[in-house]
């Protein structure tokens, strides 16, 4: 018999995605929606499609996820972002491992990023493994990682093969807006760790990111869009280090002996 599972969805004003996302996890034993944002239609939509809905003012994503863990009623949880879809193959794979004897306490899921209508297979966008299926008694989200949240898992983790489909950026405007926010948050995180950027970091780090994305991770195999995405992420590496440089000038860094440089 399969162990019970709660599918957890966090929402922040993504009304158009709520119903399709919930339909893709209707096989789960429980569906829990944590709602934040200004769209008052989302709780009613989610409840009408069988989900338990709780509202919580948004602070940051790790805190939202840890709050959701505390509200779930099953030990096994599956986090699904509202713009992600669980395929039938992935649902079957999840059920299979939860039926087995003594499974690992968590599983990494490969993520298929669809950007501007295309599945991007290179430049670090695939397989893009995400630790989304785990025992909540064995995992919590790191509060010091506001960007690209990280699960701190107590125990072994396995990997599943069917991908989680991510309907990622549908327009360049959406891409630029989110990456600007990510760059600022990443700079805050690096500053909090005491990283002291050198002047040449503003040039070398973006160039390294371009080389990594376009050549080492084979972004060139995705054609023009692969080049555009690699250049864009190189630019936002520059933006991150520019923010970091500004933060260092505004706030005293940690003593030199304790602070890494890059």
Image (cartoon, rainbow, N blue to C red):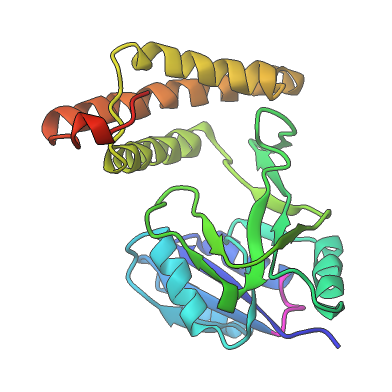
Task: Please report the residue visible at 72 percent of the width from the left and 21 percent of the height from the top.
Answer: 218
Above or below, 131 against 183 in this view is: below
Report whether residue 41 is seen. Answer: no
Q: How many marks?
A: 0
Magenta stretch: dominant secondary structure: loop
Tell me if residue 81 is in the magenta stretch. Answer: no
Residue 215 is situated, as x and y percent measured from the top left of the image, at 67, 16
Residue 53 is situated, as x and y percent measured from the top left of the image, at 50, 82
Residue 207 is situated, as x and y percent measured from the top left of the image, at 49, 13
Above or below, 61 against 249 in this view is: below
Relative to 29, 64 lies left or right: left
Relative to 28, 209 lies left or right: left
Q: Quadrant of the N terminus?
A: bottom right
Task: Please report the residue visible at 12 percent of the width from the left and 32 percent of the height from the top.
Answer: 250
Front position in the image: 174 or 156 = 156
Q: Quadrant of the C terminus?
A: top left
Task: Please report the residue visible at 29 percent of the width from the left and 24 percent of the height from the top.
Answer: 242
Above or below, 174 against 54 in this view is: above
Tell me if residue 26 is in the magenta stretch. Answer: yes
Front position in the image: 129 or 104 = 104
In the image, which residues are magenta? 25-29
Relative to 203, 21 lies left or right: right
């Amino acid at each position: 018999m399969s162990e019970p599972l709660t599918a957890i969805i966090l929402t922040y004003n993504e009304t158009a995605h709520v119903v399709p996302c919930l339909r893709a996890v209707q096989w789960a034993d429980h569906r829990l929606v944590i709602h934040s944002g200004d769209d008052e239609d989302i709780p009613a939509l989610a409840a009408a499609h069988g989900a338990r809905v709780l509202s919580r003012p948004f602070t940051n994503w790790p805190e939202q996820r840890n709050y959701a863990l505390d509200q779930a009623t099953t030990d096994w949880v599956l986090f699904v972002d509202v713009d992600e879809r669980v395929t039938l193959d992935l649902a079957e794979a999840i059920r299979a491992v939860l039926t087995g004897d003594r499974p690992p306490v968590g599983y990494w899921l490969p993520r298929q990023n669809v950007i501007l209508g295309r599945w991007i297979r290179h430049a670090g966008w695939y397989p893009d493994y995400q630790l989304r299926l785990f025992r909540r008694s064995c995992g919590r989200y790191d509060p010091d990682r506001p960007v690209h949240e990280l699960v701190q898992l107590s125990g072994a983790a396995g990997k599943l093969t069917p991908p989680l489909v991510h309907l990622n950026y549908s327009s360049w405007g959406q891409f630029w807006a989110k990456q600007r926010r990510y760059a600022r948050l990443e700079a805050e995180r690096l500053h909090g760790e005491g990283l002291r950027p050198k002047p040449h970091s503003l040039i070398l780090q973006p160039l390294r990111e371009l080389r990594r994305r376009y050549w080492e991770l084979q972004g060139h195999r995705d054609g023009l869009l692969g080049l555009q995405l690699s250049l864009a992420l190189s630019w936002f590496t520059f933006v991150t280090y520019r923010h970091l440089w500004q933060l260092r000038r505004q706030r005293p860094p940690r003593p030199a002996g304790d602070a890494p440089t890059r």
